Amino acid sequence: MKAALKRYARPLLGVLISGLLLWQLFAHIDMAKLRSTLLAAQLLPLLLGLCAVVAGFALRALRWHAMVAHFTPTVRLPATATAFLSSFALNNTLPLRAGDLARTFMYAKELKTSPATLAATLLIERLLDAATLALLFCVGLWLVPAEKIPAAWMGWVHQAGAILSIAAVVGLVVLFLLPKIVMWALRHFEHTSKGAKLKVIVVQFGAAFGLLRSPVLVCKLLALSLLSWGLEGCVFLAVAHALGMVLPGYAPWFALSTATLATLIPGTPGHLGTFDYFAVLGFSLYGIGRTDGASMALLIHLLLWLPVTLVGGALLLRRQGTGALDKIHQLEKEHA
């Protein structure tokens, strides 16, 4: 009973939060205008947006490949790209971050890299994303006209920007120190079989952060992060053009930061509701009405979700076969 409660509590909480945010979003928009705006979308800007999606994910896949290749120089880009895109397809459709489990454990043998090392690269990937998005958010706040921010929000919004920036730096420091702290704790029971196994995992996990000691690699990872998220902001811009809307210069990248940072909130697979509500909130601070913002957010969400899910799902089936879902469920049981 307790195991079932633990397994389903977070997904149920996510559904509840997503439902509340969707209700809050759709309760304050003109549905007729929303429908007519979406039906009038122009194809060419959407195709350009799709190109930006492809280019952005290609750069993010290349970034992860660079991290894995640091430890396994013989690993091939198609193999890491398959694991990367498959994990997004799984995260977009299954709860409990199933894609992260797959990328860490299911593809470890094929990538010839230990699960602990792959887990560390995922954490570094998340830190790079968080730092980049925090930067976009802070720049966006600085550019938002003061009169657009409600007086009651002013202090909170600027504090949020500062907290995000500090959290990204503190998180990186903590992750550097975490393996050493755990190793110190392991000394008390490393003579046991479980302690010895855990020590090996922690050593591999900690060693993975050694890639951050390479200035060239760090600069490469940072550049790929900025370029990939910059391209994702272009998706927001392309959708605005497709719907015949003119946005203030930085609005697409600010809405990107608010929408994507909001995916840290528990929600459904694919971040239904969390992404959309906070994208509209980001647009609103740049003077975009709720209905127009919702039109863009829904179409952007579809453009980001559908292609990656289809391509990643196809690659997953090609490499893992029809038993892929059974493997995922087994991993969830083992690592719950």
Image (cartoon, rainbow, N blue to C red):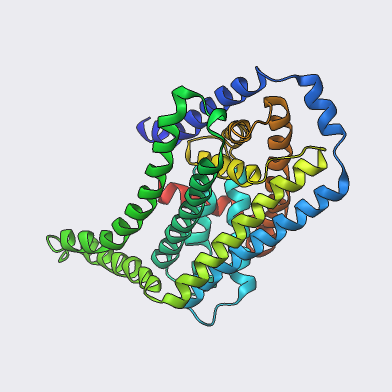
Q: Residue furthest top?
A: 27
Q: Residue furthest bottom?
A: 74
Q: Position of residue 156 (x, y in %)?
A: 41, 31
Q: Is residue 200 left or right of residue 27?
A: left
Residue 169 or residue 145, whichever sits in front: 145
What quarter of the picture does the C terminus occupy?
top left
Total numbered circles:
0
Q: Residue at x 76, y 58 (%)?
A: 51
Q: Is residue 95 visible?
A: no
The residue lying furthest to the left in this view is 188
Specify whether 149 is left or right of 38. left
**Does residue 193 lie above or below 134 as drawn?**
below
Residue in the image at 81% along x and 38% along y: 243
* Left or right: 265 as drawn, with respect to 145: left
Is 60 left or right of 2, judged from the image as shown?
A: right
Closer-to-camera residue (74/176): 176
Quadrant of the rendered structure where residue 187 is?
bottom left
Q: Is residue 196 above or below residue 85?
A: below
| Residue 42, percent from left and from top | 87, 42
Query: For residue 321, which quarter of the picture?
Result: bottom right
Residue 265 can be seen in this image: yes
Q: Residue at 47%, 58% (x, y): give it.
A: 128
In percent of width and height, residue 25 lies at 63, 24
* Quadrant of image for the N terminus: top left
Q: Residue at x 65, y 31 (%)?
A: 287
Q: 199 or 327, which is in the foreground?
A: 199
Residue 224 on image: x %, y % = 57, 65
